[in-house]
Amino acid sequence: MTSNPVLSVDMLSLEFRTSGQCVHALDKVSFSLARGETLSLVGESGCGKSVTAMAIMGLLPKNSARVTSGSIRLDGTNLIGLSERQMQTIRGNRIGMVFQDPMTSLNPVHTIGMQIAEAVRRHKHVSKKDAWARARQMLERVRIPDAANRLLAYPHELSGGQRQRVMIAIALACDPELLIADEPTTALDVTVQAQILELIGELKTELGMSVLLITHDLGVVAASADRMMVMYAGRIVEEGPVERVFARPSHGYTAGLLRSLPGHGAQRRGLLAEIGGTVPRLDKLVEGCVYAPRCAFAAGPCTAALPPPRQIEAGHRSACIRHEAVFGAMADNDIVRSWA
């Protein structure tokens, strides 16, 4: 764990109760985020990435979601157990969040200016005039042209990239310590994706904040993150500095994700590799390693007991007893060799 982190999640387990059924969505998730660091959480849809973010923000439904163990600490303060009123002083103020789809996250009946100014007035207790000035400043900060007039626009009048910039402006309007970006480039073309990621990186440096970047796109991870965690079925299966995980993948799931990326040269020809099967239902998890049924490297011991995380090298851990076999098979992979 990082010393003196801005965010520390320790042994977090969470369950959902629906129709009398109990589903374990997160299982002993632990990680920390240093000040000024970008940490990426990677995995397929259904692996628990967004649930982790919503748990940090305290936005999970109280009637069905329950934290069964662990803690979430922001600058040492445990967020688990805080009242809704206490969490409201943290959301949008000390922690900002950019959601996946800005079209559904923005209010369609309020202007862009009103939505940014509302966040400022709620937390900073300034006048309407000052909040409006701050809203204009934020639009200029995220490089939306003609900011003064755009304040009067409604979400449907903006492009997808501009709406995402507005979401970033709202999230950063109160200069938070931590930004959670949940798939911030979803449904954007590659040029706009690059612009959004560059903007987040610049603002992170300017404000000195930390970023938790949630994505399924390893290209985004390679371009933007300092460290990465690979999540599968509510568990962290591999974590470490981006360059080390790409250069020495040590879990079958990480290897599968890297194999599915388009390479170049000889490995660019032919069909992309795919991971067979699907993420398991969380109420139907197998004994042992939950990835074993889909893993090309699985052996008998993999299904006998849940593999504990083990250190591969400094700062790099993997919950895989076959990590040597995984890396050996991936050593000649075009992407892995480019990072080695």
Image (cartoon, helix red, strand yellow):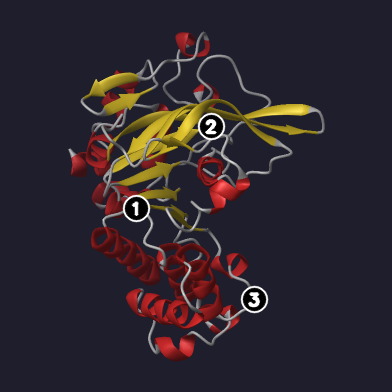
Q: CA distance from mark 2 to mark 3?
A: 33 Å
**Residue that protrudes farthest toward the right in the picture:** 19
Q: Residue at x 39, y 21 (%)?
A: 319
Q: Judging from the image, what secondary structure is the residue with disc 2 in?
A: loop
According to the image, label 3 marks what residue? 108
Residue flagged by tag 3: what amino acid is it?
Answer: Pro
Which label's residue is closer to the chain start, 2 or 1?
A: 1
Q: Residues within 10 Å of mark 2 (few under 14, many from 20)?
A: many
Q: Name the one closer to the observer, 46 or 165.
A: 165
The correct choice, above or below, for 212 with respect to 202 in the image is: above
State left or right for residue 215 relative to residue 157. left
* Figure quadrant of residue 80: top right
Dot placed on the residue nearer the N-terminal end, 2 or 3: 3
* Residue at the image position 43 percent from the left and 42 percent from the top: 42
Q: CA distance from mark 2 to mark 1?
A: 22 Å
Which amino acid, mark 1? Gly
The picture places residue 92, in percent across and down from the top left corner, at 48, 58
Estimate the x, y position of residue 273 in percent, counting from the top left.
Answer: 43, 42
Q: Residue at x 53, y 14 (%)?
A: 288
Q: Contact (CB < 8 A) between labels 2 and 1?
A: no
Q: Quadrant of the C terminus?
A: top left
Which residue in the protein does label 1 denote? 219
